[in-house]
Amino acid sequence: IMTSTAAIHIGSYAPAADTAPVGSSVTVIQAPTKESLPNCLSSMKSEALSSISIHLQYDELLTHYDSLALASLVPYLIPNGSISVHVVMSAANGAASNNNTSSMDWGIIMTSFVLAGLKTQSEQRQKDGGRVFTAQKAAAPPAASSAPMRLNLGAKKSKVTLNLNDDDDDDDQIDEDDLLLNSGNSGMLAPPPTIDMEARAKAAADDCGGRKACDDCTCGRAEREADEEKKTADPLPKSSACGNCAKGDAFRCAGCPYLGKPAFKEGEEHLVLKLDDDV
C-alpha cells in the first residue's frame, strides 16, 4: 500500500542518504527559515498526508523551530496521521553538542504538540544524542447514525375540543354596555353631583379655616364677628329705678343692670372699652 509522506528539512539540515521507507511516497520540502515553516505545505491538499516528519539540527532548534507553526501543518494530515520531529546531532558539533543536551529545554516540542491538538505518543533518544518526538492526530468523529423513523399511523386519535367563546381573560374588565344599562331607564349615565359655588367661595375667602378669628386678624373677620355680636346682644336698659346707674356700684341698687361696670357719663352707657393687654 502506497502512503504519502512529507519530509520537511528545516534550516541547514541535509540528510546523508535517502532514508525513505520502502513502499512509500516521500515529498521532501525545504524550510530554510523559521518564518517559512507555517506555509511550507500550502501547495498540498487538505488531509493528503499520512505522516509528516520534521528534521532539523540540534543547534538550530531554538532559532528555526516554531512551536506555533506546527498547528498550521496538522490540517494536511489524515485522521490518525502521525507527525514526528527529528532533532539531529551533527558530526561537526561532536562531543561539545553531546555534553549540552542535558541543558536543552525539550519542552518546546512538547508544547507545540499540545498547541496543535496532537496526542503525544513517544520520545526516543538516539545514540548520537539526538531526539525523535512523535505525536498523532485525533481520529475522525463517528458519523451520525441515521436510524429510520417509524410512524405509528394506527394509534388511536385523541379528540381535542377548542372553546372559542372562552372569555376567562376578560373577567377583570368592565363592560361599557353594563354601565349604561345600570344607570336607569333613560340609558344615560348619572349626572355629576351639584357643587355649591357660593359655599366654596366663602370657604376660599376664609383665611382662618373656619376657626375663631386670629388675634392679629387682617382679613376683616374680627370686625365682622364684633358687629354680629352687637346685633345679637340684648340691649341694656338705659337706667334703673334708683337713677344712680352712672355713678358706680356704690350708688346702684341691687337690681341695677350696670352692676360690675365702671361709672360712666350719661349717654355713654353703651361705650365698649378694649382693655386687653397687648404686652
Image (cartoon, rainbow, N blue to C red):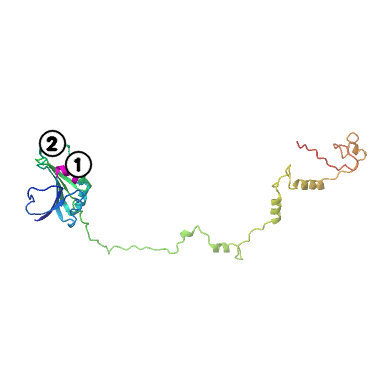
> How far across and how far down the image is residue 262, in percent?
86, 37
- How far apart marks 1 and 2 lie (CA) works out to 18 Å
Residue sitting at x 21%, y 44%: 111
Look at the image and tell me in which quarter the C terminus lies.
top right
Residue sitting at x 71%, y 51%: 205
Q: Which residue is mark 2?
A: 99
Amino acid type, residue under disc 2 in the picture: Asn
Foreground disc of the pair 1, 2: 2
Answer with mark 1 or mark 2, whichever residue precedes in sequence. Answer: 2
Q: Secondary structure at mark 2?
A: helix
Residue lying furthest bottom: 186
Residue 107's mark?
Answer: 1
> How far across and how far down the image is residue 181, in percent?
57, 64
Left or right of 124, for residue 207 = right
Look at the image and tell me in which quarter the N terminus lies.
bottom left
Residue sitting at x 90%, y 38%: 246
> How far across and how far down the image is residue 160, in percent?
37, 63
Look at the picture and state if 135 lies above or below 160.
above
> How far across and how far down the image is residue 45, in percent?
18, 57
Residue stretch in magenta: 57-64
Residue 88's mark?
Answer: none
Q: Quick one: 110 or 183, which is closer to the camera?
A: 110
Q: Quick one: 158 or 143, which is closer to the camera?
A: 143
Q: Quick one: 100 or 218, which is closer to the camera?
A: 100
Reply yes or no: does residue 184 show up in magenta. Answer: no
Amino acid type, residue under disc 1 in the picture: Gly
Q: Secondary structure at mark 1?
A: helix
Reply yes or no: does residue 59 show up in magenta. Answer: yes
Corner quadrant of residue 217? top right
**Few, some or many C-alpha atoms within 10 Å of disc 2 (few <14, some 14-19, many ≥20)?**
few
